[in-house]
Amino acid sequence: MYKAKNSRDTADFEVIEDTTVGEWIGLHIVMLIPVVNIIMLLLIMCTKRLNKSLRHFAMATLLLFLISLMVLLWSGRTIDITDFFGGRGLF
């Protein structure tokens, strides 16, 4: 349900309902799809009519993604699946 902040201004909406457990589970399932997850996070972050908790979750997730990408590029090392299953190890 959306409620206008002032009676004259109908473009500024405030969400008054909570995010359900099913919506959170659906969001996490969508987050498993490689390219779609980043697009969904950007859409959630830019949409003003969504719940603040969803927008803050999208901002935090994108921030952590960018930090981990910078650390990965700065270190110059990629982690391969063979690092975990025998071979030379992680270090």
Image: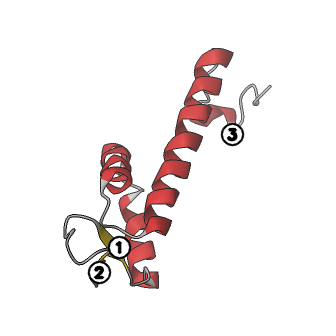
In the displayed structure, 85 sits above or below 87; it is: below
Crowding around mark 2 (Cα neighbors within 10 Å: few <14, some 14 to 19, many 20+) is few
Q: Quadrant of residue 54?
A: bottom left
Describe residue 17's horizontal placement relative to residue 10 as left or right: right
Residue at the disc numbered 3? 84
- Please identify the quadrant where the N terminus is shown: bottom left
Secondary structure beneath disc 1? strand
Secondary structure beneath disc 3? loop
Rounded to the nearest whole Å, what is the CA distance between mark 2 and mark 1? 5 Å
Q: Residue at x 71, y 29 (%)?
A: 87
Label at residue 3: 2
The amino acid type, in three-letter code, at marker 2 is Lys
Between label 3 and label 2, give the one nearer the viewer. 2
Rounded to the nearest whole Å, what is the CA distance between mark 3 and mark 2? 51 Å
Crowding around mark 1 (Cα neighbors within 10 Å: few <14, some 14 to 19, many 20+) is some
Secondary structure beneath disc 2? strand
Describe residue 38's horizontal placement relative to residue 69 as left or right: left
Residue at the disc numbered 1? 14
Describe residue 67's horizontal placement relative to residue 42 as left or right: right
Q: Residue at x 19, y 70 (%)?
A: 10
Label at residue 31: none
Percent position of residue 14, x then y: 35, 73
The amino acid type, in three-letter code, at marker 3 is Phe
Disc 2 and disc 1 in contact, CB within 8 angstroms = yes
Percent position of residue 71, x then y: 65, 25
The amino acid type, in three-letter code, at marker 1 is Glu
Between label 1 and label 3, give the one nearer the viewer. 1
Q: Residue at x 36, y 76 (%)?
A: 15
